[in-house]
């Protein structure tokens, strides 16, 4: 009979580890004396997500124990990144387990080499006060977790309603910024006056200190877009902005690590002040800011009526959000890109959090590149010239028919689908997920079909329930869903 270590080490994917532990739970219901129990209580989390119980074979050795601790560290980290909590209480029949988790949490996630500018941004993502791991029977088990890993426990979006029906929407991404003007049409649907415009946010050879010039360019282009729609600022009810930020209580408190790679610290500070800058420069028009993943999710929900849906937008980074049964954004931290889906030691490293194997490192433009490099697929193999990139070239190959690399390219996109299955398995106990919607230019055509195949295979192999997965095909949904979401946020 295989031991716990042999079972777990068959695969580093979290869906596999969860399936193994579900098997332990089933066995413990029949043979309770053969298993140890561990209960995690998340203080400050919503009640339905506040307790998780795990079982582990009683006759385990040191290797088994280390793997169990590693698994619990991933569970705790994923809980913090999604529904949030203030602290964790550990109650276990395994002696000193709380102490081991507390000590291992630092080692498990604390990777060296974080540039100071990125580290400072990450610390603004994660909350500060009093997160600790506690044991109700070990008084010395209290220990603070790394400041940059403790997530704020909520992201309450300001819900306001304006009387006007025109909205200027601006979505700022790491590489592209999109601007569009929308009006509220029939049945609450938003319609573009004209096709939105896209401008480069930043090029690899740009001066990282020029954020103020970039913001000035966005403001100028926004005014020009209004003029092309035959409107001026007096016709605008509000401005909706979408970017990679943390927005609790209508305040921007953290900017995505991708921006830290593009701009210096002063530039990142300016991006964090986007709402006030836009408002002051655009005649004091109200500005409402929303996280990019939440914008994608909200736009899809309002346009399609989907409920209980996990929305994934594969841009340069992963933008993700969840829509609840009422069609609203789920309350919580909702940083799905930070969810650990690969518990192995060789997963790609998140540039900001320094956590290995997170969803954003697999389900995005960056993720496709990471997976491609794991398959020894690089620019040289693909014959890429200046101006192209590996993920885009792979998408082109999949949607063609004459390349000898088409089979390999399909395998890479199928791996993206399997990683989506891992993300669903890691979060299904915290969110009601009945549908998964995937958008992004890189999953168009046959590339999207490959993602669906990999997703179905991944959930089937891990014994988790397969939910319907939808690849957005509408070109505006692929390119401009974030603008719709930013505009809908104005009318929430």
Image (spheres, grey):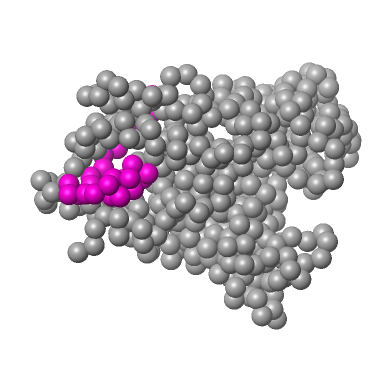
Left or right? Give the position of 308 relative to 191: left
- Quick one: quadrant of the N terminus? bottom left
Left or right? Give the position of 349 relative to 392: left
Q: Position of residue 479 (x, y in %)?
A: 70, 51
* Highlighted magenta segment, given as a residue range: 44-71
The residue drawn where x is 62% and y is 67% is 376
Closer to the camera, 366 or 308? 366
Location of residue 226 (image quadrant)? top right
Closer to the camera, 316 or 479? 316
The residue drawn where x is 11% and y is 50% is 31
Residue 339 vs 397, above or below: the answer is: above
Examine the structure image and report whether residue 55 is included in the region drawn in magenta.
yes
State whether residue 354 appears in this view: yes
- Quick one: quadrant of the C terminus? top right
State whether residue 336 appears in this view: no
The residue drawn where x is 42% and y is 24% is 144
**Total labels drawn:** 0
Left or right? Give the position of 102 relative to 380: left
Examine the structure image and report whether residue 45 is included in the region drawn in magenta.
yes
The residue drawn where x is 17% and y is 49% is 59
Q: Position of residue 328 (x, y in %)?
A: 51, 36
Location of residue 429 (image quadrant)? top left
Left or right? Give the position of 67 relative to 218: left
Q: Position of residue 53 (x, y in %)?
A: 26, 39
Q: Position of residue 286 (x, y in %)?
A: 72, 22
């Amino acid at each position: 009979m295989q031991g716990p270590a042999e079972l777990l080490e068959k695969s580093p994917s979290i869906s596999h580890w969860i399936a193994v532990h579900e098997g332990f739970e089933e066995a413990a219901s029949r043979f309770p004396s053969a298993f140890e129990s561990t209960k995690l209580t998340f203080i400050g989390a919503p009640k339905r997500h506040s307790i998780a119980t795990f079982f582990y074979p009683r006759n385990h050795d040191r290797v088994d124990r280390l793997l169990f601790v590693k698994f619990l560290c991933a569970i705790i980290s994923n809980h913090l990144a999604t529904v949030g909590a203030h602290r964790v209480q550990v109650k276990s029949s395994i002696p000193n387990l709380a102490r081991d988790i507390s000590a291992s949490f630092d080692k498990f996630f604390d990777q060296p080499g974080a540039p100071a500018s990125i580290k400072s941004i990450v610390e603004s993502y994660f909350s500060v006060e009093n997160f600790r791991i506690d044991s109700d029977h070990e008084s010395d088990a209290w220990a603070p977790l790394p400041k940059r890993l403790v997530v704020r426990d909520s992201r309450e979006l300001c819900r306001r309603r304006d009387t006007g029906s025109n909205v200027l929407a601006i979505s700022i991404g790491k590489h592209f910024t999109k601007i569009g003007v929308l009006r509220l049409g029939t049945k609450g649907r938003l319609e573009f006056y004209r096709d939105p415009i896209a401008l480069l946010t930043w090029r690899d050879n740009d001066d990282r200190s020029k954020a103020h010039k970039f913001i000035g360019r966005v403001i100028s282009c926004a005014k020009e877009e209004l003029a092309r729609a035959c409107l001026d600022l007096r016709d605008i009810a509000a401005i909706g902005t979408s970017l990679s930020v943390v927005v609790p209580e209508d305040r921007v408190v953290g900017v995505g690590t991708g921006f830290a790679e593009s701009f210096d610290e002063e530039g990142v500070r300016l991006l964090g002040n986007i709402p006030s800058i836009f408002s002051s420069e655009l005649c004091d028009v109200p500005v409402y800011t929303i996280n990019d993943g939440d914008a994608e999710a909200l736009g899809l929900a309002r346009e399609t009526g989907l409920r209980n849906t996990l929305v994934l937008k594969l841009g340069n980074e992963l933008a993700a959000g969840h829509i609840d049964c009422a069609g609203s954004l789920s309350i919580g931290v909702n940083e799905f890109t930070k969810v650990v889906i690969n518990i192995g030691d060789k997963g790609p490293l998140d540039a900001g959090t320094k956590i290995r194997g997170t969803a954003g490192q697999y389900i995005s433009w960056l993720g496709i590149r990471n997976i491609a490099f794991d398959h020894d697929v690089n620019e040289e193999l693909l014959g890429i010239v200046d101006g192209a990139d590996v993920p885009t070239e792979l998408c082109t190959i999949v949607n063609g028919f004459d390349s000898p690399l088409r089979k390999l390219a399909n395998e890479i996109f199928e791996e993206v689908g399997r990683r989506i299955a891992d993300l669903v398995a890691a979060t299904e106990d915290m969110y009601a997920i009945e549908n998964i919607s995937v958008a992004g230019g890189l999953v168009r055509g046959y590339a999207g079909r490959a993602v669906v195949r990999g997703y179905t295979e991944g959930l089937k192999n891990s014994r988790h329930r397969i939910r319907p997965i939808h690849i957005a095909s509408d070109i505006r949904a692929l390119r401009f869903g974030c603008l719709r979401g930013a505009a809908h946020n104005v009318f929430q």
